[in-house]
Image (spheres, coloured by chain):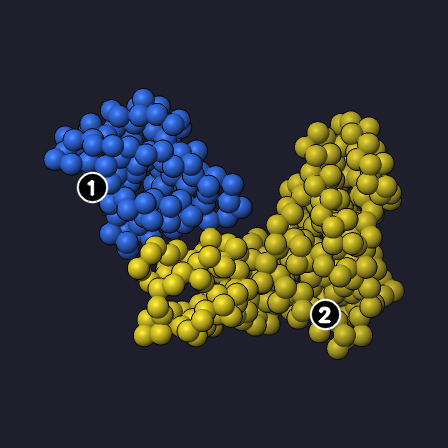
Chain colours: A yellow, B blue
Amino acid sequence: MKKIASTGTKGGVGKSTFAILLAFKLSKNKRVVLCDCDVECPNDYLILNQKLKNPENIYQDYPVLDKKRCVKCGICSKTCKENAIFWVKDKYPIFIYDLCTNCGACVIVCPNKAIKTKREKSGESFVNKVNDNFWLITGRSKPGITETGPIVSEVKERAIKFAKKKKVDYIILDTAPGTHCSVIQALLNVDKAYAVTEPTPLGAHDLSLILELIKKIKVPAEIILNKADVGNRELIEKIAKKFKTKISIEIPYSEKLVKAYCEKDLRRVAKLI
Amino acid sequence: MKIAVSASGESLDSNVDPRFGRCPYFIIVDTEDNKIKSHEVVTNEAVQAMRGAGIQAAQTVANKGAKVVITGNIGPNAFNVLSQTGIKVFTGVSGKVDEALKKYLKGELKESTKSSF
């Protein structure tokens, strides 16, 4: 089973389109799971004309203070790398769940075992059967949750488990745009990451950010250049050379393609590429 | 009583910084009988925080013993922890730091009941 990611730092360059088309094409003679890891606003299901099915909750552990045990030492606050624990001398620490990544460090370092955890729902995962060879697994965070890395990690785990059960050949992970926790979680341990970009100054700048991240987590990468015939191609070639990364697929700009995409006519999109 | 003002510079005639969590400095003044007795300039380390700058900045002013915060805008996380610690917050303030302090001491500023956004 191969794990392939479609990623990029810039939004709107065609990450999801590429991921879906790849899954669509592979499903003609292979078994494929597409995992939508853009959990803050998953949209692969919309493009695939699906209604999300088979929901399953995702939970996370948040710290809770046992005031009877707490001696107001502040070690938890000093340990927290996310600034998620507010502490002032002689006062009880205050946990800010919005910033908590559920790493559990505060629970471990507390010398008086004053920090317990409570489970709270942070998101959902869904399973849709698109065709006999193609399943879509979608992750969706609960509105208001700002730290989505742990949700992506859980959805990915479920997708891998599901794929093993269904004896799938490929898992395609469609990441959120960016280089933050959520993207890193999706990219860890993939067999190949396709960095999707466009030939614009911002496209080039953001390509270098994602390739830098991909290099750090030691994943093989290739570049997909969308709208390859408009803008300035040299900008992308320069970055590709710097990172010794191949531009493996080029997709020309086409108004017909945009139209087919907006009309959710995937077969027509696939034919046009 | 100590008052913390988010500031763009290191002196009393610098501007009130519109940001609380990521302002470069806090000017912390000590008042007595409604007059400024002394002031201290604190560099805001939270400027460099990846996340949670507001929380870190709130910790800085609270640990300096401030009972009042004067700033332009403040986020919900910082506002909530400051309120829970019993620190009064005044937002929507601009202009020079010393002028803002004069206004506060004359009772012309209105205490905020919620964060700026």
Q: Amino acid at mark 2?
A: Ile
Judge left or right: residue A253 versus residue B49.
right
Picture quarter containing residue B111?
top left
Relative image position of residue B19 (x, y in whole percent)? 40, 35
Q: Residue at x 31, y 25 (%)?
A: B12
Q: CA distance from mark 2 to mark 1?
A: 59 Å
Q: Chain of mark 2?
A: A
Quadrant of the snapshot with the C terminus of chain A:
top right
Looking at the image, which residue is at 33% across and 62% down? A92
Q: Residue furthest bottom?
A: A165
Label 1 lies in what chain?
A: B
Q: Amino acid at mark 1?
A: Met
Q: Is residue B67 left or right of residue A156?
A: left
Residue at image location 61% in from the left, 55% down from the top: A182
Badge 2 and badge 1 in a common chain: no
Label of residue A160 in the image: 2
User: For numbered disc 1, what is the local secondary structure?
Assistant: loop
Q: Which mark is residue A178?
A: none
Mark 2 lies on a secondary structure that is helix
Quarter of the image with the N terminus of chain A is bottom right
A92 above or below A218?
A: below
Q: Which residue is mark 1?
A: B1
Q: Is B33 above or below relative to A181?
A: above
